[in-house]
Image: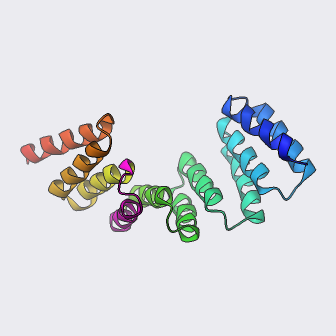
Amino acid sequence: MPEPWMGRGEIYSVEGRFDESIAAYDGAIQAASNESEAWAGKALAYQGLNNYSASLIMIDKAIEIDGGNARYWSSKGLIYKKIGNDSESAAAFNRAAQIDPDCASCWNHLGLALYRLGNYTDALDAFERAIEIDPDYLDPWNNKGIALVKGFADLEEAIRCFDQAIMIDPDRMQAYVNKANILYLRIAL
């Protein structure tokens, strides 16, 4: 019965007790080695220890058991992001978005990976898909604005994106900073 071990693993992870979390997930895996959630939880605990190579091994095991889980592919994308492998990150987020086409976060993270690869057109498409899914999700609005500036020098549309982000959450300062930088850039040009 892996459930008690799973609960402990999750609690320990939330508390930042990652070694204990790993031990608890090991107990769950011993009880049921095909429990994909235990492998995914263990991957998350290894991330907490900044052991990304072990985390990748664990998330790959979760994917081997349940390859149709978009959350696992997203986790893999985030791990690759943390180690600076943007092409693998983009591939993992692309897979997550294929599995769950309505996952706005998957599309937003795919856009970020594509942006870091310099693929601004596809990044912009991914941000727009995230916005289409969830128009109140601030991050893709902000990211779309940045992509418009960097990839297309479309300052006016970028300002509209930052304004939308500000409307969604007036307390998030990053959109204000981005807008101010663009307004300054527009004046300087």
Q: Which residues are magenta?
A: 119-138
Which of the two residues, 40 or 122, is positioned nearer the viewer here? 40
Which of the two residues, 158 or 1, is positioned nearer the viewer here? 1
**Where residue 69 sits in the image (x, y, percent)?**
66, 63
**Where residue 149 sits in the image (x, y, percent)?**
23, 54
Colour setup of the view: rainbow
Answer left or right for 64 relative to 73: right
Callout count = 0
Answer left or right for 106 relative to 22: left
Which residue is pictured at 33% across the width and 36% down the height? 172
Which residue is pictured at 27% across the width and 60% down the height? 151
Answer left or right for 140 relative to 157: right
Q: Residue furthest bottom?
A: 98
Which residue is pictured at 70% across the width and 47% down the height? 55
Answer left or right for 5 relative to 114: right
**Where residue 37 sits in the image (x, y, percent)?**
75, 52
- Residue 85 vs 8, above or below: the answer is below
In the image, residue 129 lies in the stretch drawn in magenta = yes
Which residue is pictured at 8% across the width and 43% down the height? 188
Q: Quadrant of residue 67?
A: bottom right
Q: Assign the magenta stretch its main secondary structure.
A: helix
In the image, residue 130 lies in the stretch drawn in magenta = yes
